[in-house]
Amino acid sequence: MTEEIKTKIVNTQPRSLSKKMAQRTALDIQAFWLARGHVIHVWVERCGRNTLSRDYGVRSDMRNGLPVKK
């Protein structure tokens, strides 16, 4: 009989991003790909339908997490 090893994945990411955190994340993503020779476009958007929401997200022109070949 074999035992299955179960691993618990701990989510270390915050549930929401402040505008400052989103901007920093966008810059980190852009720098990561620039160091590898790819120019990508990233931007920060407010998330949700509520105009008073303080949650922001990072968007980019990448597909499936990879730069688009041009």
Image (tube, rainbow, N blue to C red):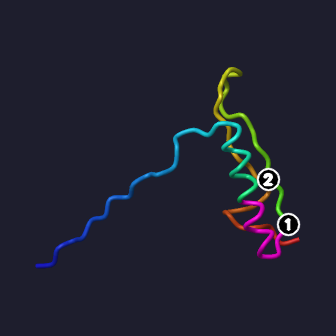
Residue 37 in the magenta stretch? The answer is yes
Magenta region: which residues? 29-38
Residue at (80, 67) in percent of width and height = 68
Residue at (66, 43) in percent of width and height = 21
Location of residue 11 with respect to 51 vertically, above or below: below
Quadrant of the drawing holding the N terminus:
bottom left
Outermost right residue: 70
Residue carrying label 2: 42
Residue at (51, 49) in percent of width and height = 13
Residue at (67, 63) in percent of width and height = 65
Outermost left residue: 1
- Amino acid type of the residue that numbered disc 2 sits on in the rendered structure: Val
- Amino acid type of the residue that numbered disc 1 sits on in the rendered structure: Val
- The tally of labels here is 2
Label annotation for residue 21: none
Where in the figure is residue 43, as x and y percent of width and height?
A: 79, 47
Residue carrying label 1: 39
The secondary element bearing badge 2 is classed as strand
